Image (cartoon, rainbow, N blue to C red):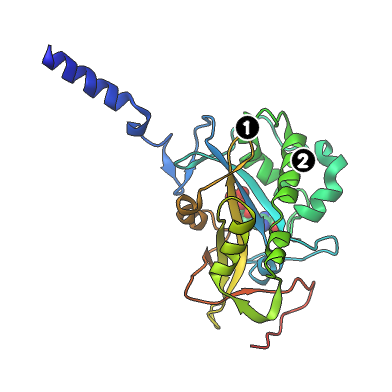
Amino acid sequence: MHISFLVLSVVVLFASPSFQKPHGNNHDQNQVSESKDFDYLVLRQIWPKTSCMFPGSHQCTIKNTVSSWVIHGLWPNYNVGFPSFCNKTDKFRPDLIQPIVADLEKYWPNLYTDTPLNSFWQHEWEKHGTCALSLKQVTNERDYFQMTLGLREKFDFGTLLEKASIVPDNSKSYELAEFINAIEKELAFAPVLSCFVEKESKRQFLAEMQICLNKSLEQIDCSEHNKAKMVAMRANEHEQQCSPKMPVHYPVLDRNQKIIFNF
Ligand code: 5GP
């Protein structure tokens, strides 16, 4: 009697979700090829000036239409890892987003002007957007882009920072905590930030910020969980988690101009 109870308990324990392996094989640190339904969404935005100061091998241009934080992506995530390329037959179709292309150029621009205009949207749709199709709000590519534009407007990092008097400035710097506290005060939870560090001067520049949302598109707390992930998802080798020990620069969004800092 006792033994059968013990055997049953062990079976139940190992069958429980907390004992199951992360979905699929973990390659590329976080990427998981299996297309099981995701757990939450990451909304990540870019500060274009910093992105263009550290373009890696790309040619980067901030067009006149851009004057705010812009979308990097809306990414379905698992609690461990993330799905990608969930529907290989649902290829990007530029015609589907034609009616909203002006908004996309403003708020989700391809800053890398050495790549085709559509290539960034194509990448984001095919890699991440196709994994959001399980959301009731997302039945197709247009829905995904439209919904993400709406989320950028709702969670407008630039305006939220401005409310705490944090504005781009080439002659001063901020503490990392000032950015985190400003967003946390206005939203429910803290964001996760990434920075680029200039090799020669060792100065760090605010590059991207992200928050997490549940499937009802409400913010959830994922700050600790996502710090490590943010680094894994970085766009290039110089992008990293912002250090609280160094000042954070938030450069002015002047187009085509190289910054001369007065500090
Ligand atoms: P993920 O692959 O996770 O969606 O996003 C990372 C990729 O987005 C990186 O390869 C990064 O270089 C790219 N990326 C970031 N900003 C831009 C941009 O403005 N244009 C293009 N084409 N790629 C970008």
Residue 119 visible in the picture: no
**Residue at x 54%, y 34% (from the top left corner):** 38
| Closer to viewer: mark 1 or mark 2 | 2
Residue 250 vs 172, above or below: the answer is: above
- List the residue tagged with mark 1: 88
Under circle 1, the secondary element is loop
Residue for point 69% across, 31% down: 90
Image coordinates for residue 161, horizontal then vertical, percent: 68, 64
Side (left or right) of 3 relative to 223: left
Instruction: Choose between 209 and 232: the one closer to the eye.
Output: 209
Position of residue 182 in the picture relative to residue 99 (left or right): left
Q: Which of the image's four quarters has the C terminus?
A: bottom right
Q: In the rendered structure, which amino acid carries the disc numbered 1?
A: Lys
Graded by Cα atoms within 10 Å as few (under 14), some (14 to 19) or many (20 or more), the crowding at tag 1 reads few
Closer-to-camera residue (180/54):
180
Q: Quadrant of residue 168?
A: bottom right
Q: Secondary structure at mark 2?
A: helix
Coordinates of residue 188 in the picture (x, y in percent): 59, 50
- At horizontal 53% and vertical 78% (from top left) the residue drawn is 199
Mark 1–mark 2 distance (CA, rounded to whole Å): 21 Å
Which quadrant of the figure has residue 159? bottom right
Q: Which mark is residue 131?
A: none
In the picture shown, does residue 113 fall above or below 217? Answer: below
Mark identifier at residue 146: 2
> Based on the displayed image, in which of its 4 quarters is residue 46 positioned?
bottom right
Residue 246, percent from left and from top: 51, 76
Mark 1–mark 2 CB contact (< 8 Å): no
